[in-house]
Amino acid sequence: MALTLPRRRTLFEDINKISVTANDAYILELMTELNELNEEATGFRWAAASTQIDQDRVLVNSEAFLLYVGHLKQGQSEGEKSDITFPADFKLLFLRIRLFVLYATPRMPGRARGTPCTYQSLTKIRSGLSFHANRSYRLRSMDAPRAAVLYSTITEVLRFAVTKYSIPLYGNPNTTHVGLSEIAQLIDLDMAQTRCFAVAEQHHLSWCIGRTCAVRPGSLGYNPKDKRRVPQGQFLTWRDVEIFRGTEAGHFTADIKFIVVKTNHQDAEAASKASKPSRSIRCRVMSPNLIDNLVFSVPHRILIIALRRKAIAGIDTLDELLNGEALNIQVCGRWKPSFLDQPILLGSTPRGLEVSDKPASSASLTEYLRERGKQMGYARTITFYSIRRRIATDLTEQVGPDHARRIMGHSAGSKTLEHYYLDDATITDLYAMALGESVNRQAMKETRLLHDLSTTALGAEEVRSIYGTILNEAVAAFIEQDPNAPETGSPREWRNYRRRVSQVVLTSLLRVRSEKLHETITREEATARVQRNASNSLMRAILQTCAAMPTQDPLDEEPPAMLADGGFESHYVESPPEPDIDLSPSSNVIMRFTDETSKPLDHMEVPDASVPYFTCVRLMMELLLIFSNSTPHVQAGGRLPLSTLPLSITARPRHNNQLVCNECHEDEEVDAEHRHRVWKCNAHLQRHLNSDFHSLRNKFLRRLEASHSPSSPWKCPICTQLQHPRAVEYPSSAKVLRHVEQSGQMVHLWGKEHEKLKTEAGYSSTWRHNTNGGVKASVRYERKKRAGGFAERMAVLESYGILYSEDAELAVSQPTPYEHVLSGGPAQLIDSMEVEGVTPIFEVPMNIDMDTADDFLKGCLRDDPSPPNLPSSLLQAMGLEPV
């Protein structure tokens, strides 16, 4: 019997129920709840979180200005502040607003460092003051000034300030473009130096999704400015993704539905008045046709993350995923119920050491990409929108602006694509069009590649070479000449100041080197860079491994023998069936190919037969799954031997990549291992510099060993140079050193010339120690131990009321307000019998009840005039021997 659900009541029926069945208590409770909701709704702000932050910032700055000029006072309540900031006298209100605008306009900095504020940014002052003025008067039940009058008053003074201080209308927008070559570069760099590959692979997936689906970062992660987005699930979840198997082994298709189209909060009024309300975007991402583009495959990367987290129901290993028995289009992404509302992209713990259980924010996606671009040495700052600009330009070139606008989620009448995303200069041959010639798109593509960020990048090694000595010297020089450097401050303030200076100096050094590269790079070098960036290092290594490894496609296996009772094995599929009719995309699904930007949409290129597609997929997914493991090994069945890949799996922090010893690098006698050694941390490098490795004695020893031939005996180089008649052969280098150090005791035998050359070679009484280094660890340990012991002794003395001063002893005693008491100076003996009115100490009765005193006090205060019985710890602290 089918389950029948009750019909939902209409609003009219629900209202009638109140008058029919409700009693007075229910009505009272209902009205109380409605009144509370009404009070909560009063003054509700429905603008986006970023807009509210800008409005509040303007109000805070306005109140701070009124506080400094004396109109506001510290400690006033919010109501008192509102009465002064937005007074009932509108003339006074307009005067204070105009003065604040005139003060703030020339002093507001631009968003970029060293740039002035633009008129477009100054209009936020007008919108913020207009909003808070209207809201304040309305909450206080007062008449507000007319909106048009307030708007005109602020606009008048803004226009005057713009003309007076020559403020630009718009700033220099960031128009960087990040394509496949840049993403391949960043993936290679990140895999070589990431601290946690589980964190890095999520960002790699976000880059690939951004490139393929042309989405904003807010469609993948939550908006950090609006904390309501996290409980509402305003990010990409496993529920939004479906994975299908393809007709060929190793092919997968992902259907991704992006619920959040824009990062800003959806305006209900604007949506109701729009010609077509905003909708979610659904993209069908196919597997790449080219093997070289497997590294950008969105379905494979999602499945790798799912296998790592055990999110697929019934599939726990890579073999179960790739060797599934159903080869036709079927859903293989059966996510476990506990994962459906979980985010695909997770955040990280501080410093990116581990994956956290919280969703990644849109700001973290952009910041991670920006940092990797800086480490790569790109000439300009990149953001997540750099990927969106490039794919918008490529889509417009291939399918036209209307289809590109639909893919990007813009309305049909919007011109945002043309104003903020499209780069017409790189895809339009104006000269050919003006002269009526045929457009050479291949030449335009090659020209664009020569000027891409991936071609003009400094490179990770060049950037890492700046860290260390170069950056430290530049920062020290900057601080020395900076007039705004804090003269005094806490260590935290100095640390933050040095961080800011380091960022400024590093950016300047990178810009100078980038400009030098642009001036000196040749056409041949740029072409070589383009060819080198044509493929990913990971895929090159996988292809080389596949070519050298005999692997067998599962479709080429011999059919099994027939069973005794007839038929074949239950898991055997005779051949791949025909694709289903549902394979054709529906009208509301956007078909996307990872490599469609380099080939037409209807072009299907068959992979190289010498390298099976399934083998490359298996090896790539296996490598990414076990990349973060410590020990790679070879497994049966065509598994990937990681030792054959030219990749650096050991990750190192960026700031330690150039911790090398300059003295070792400049010393020709130092072996190659020490000359090119990279130290793990600054403490290890400093310990090496403080050691005796670079002492004059060890330098002499290294020169001696470098000039020695294994087939010849050891000889003193000084005796050999003088052709001394007493020169002898030695069994080892240590014996030669002993002869050099002890020859000064027998000058009558070896001669003064021998001593002179020995001194010129570096011999001295201190040649065993490195005089240029710091204090050795052993010496620092002894000093610390002695200081700790002294501190313990002082603590014991202070506990008994004995205080010591670090001031110098006075040469002459100084009088004090107390009679017969002198301060400082040498010790003086005072005979109490010669001083009138002074009672000897032994005749002064003790004002202590011995019956109630404890045993320790009784032992210290005895009747006999001998010294008190002090505890051993106090005597040792005073430097006395215990009795």
Image: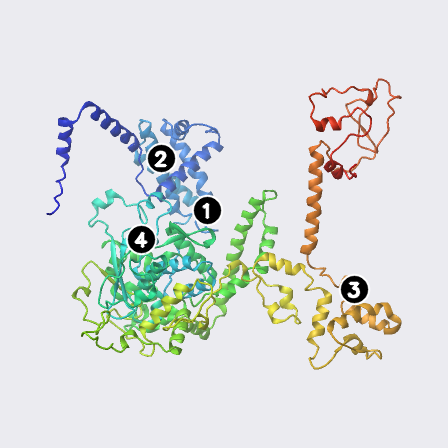
Q: What is the number of the mark on residue 109?
A: 1
Q: Measure the alpha-carbon separation of dots 3 and 4.
A: 71 Å
Marks 4 and 1, the one that precedes in the sequence: 1
Residue 132 is marked as 2
Quarter that holds the C terminus: top right
Residue at the left extreme? 1
Looking at the rendered structure, the kind of residue marked 2 is His
Provide the secondary structure element on which disc 4 rests.
loop
- Vertical side of 343 occupied by 23: above or below: above
The amino acid type of the residue labelled 1 equals: Pro
| Residue at x-position 54% and y-position 63% | 465
The residue nearer to you, when weighing 534 against 136, is: 534
Across and down, in percent, residue 321 comes to 30, 65
**Is 744 in front, or is 182?**
744
Judging by the rendered image, the residue that carries numbered circle 3 is: 764
Q: Quadrant of residue 128?
A: top left
Q: Bin the neighbour count of mark 3 within 10 Å (Cα to Cα): few under 14, some 14-19, many 20 and up.
A: few
Residues at marks 3 and 2, CA–CA distance in whole angstroms:
79 Å
Q: Secondary structure at mark 3?
A: loop
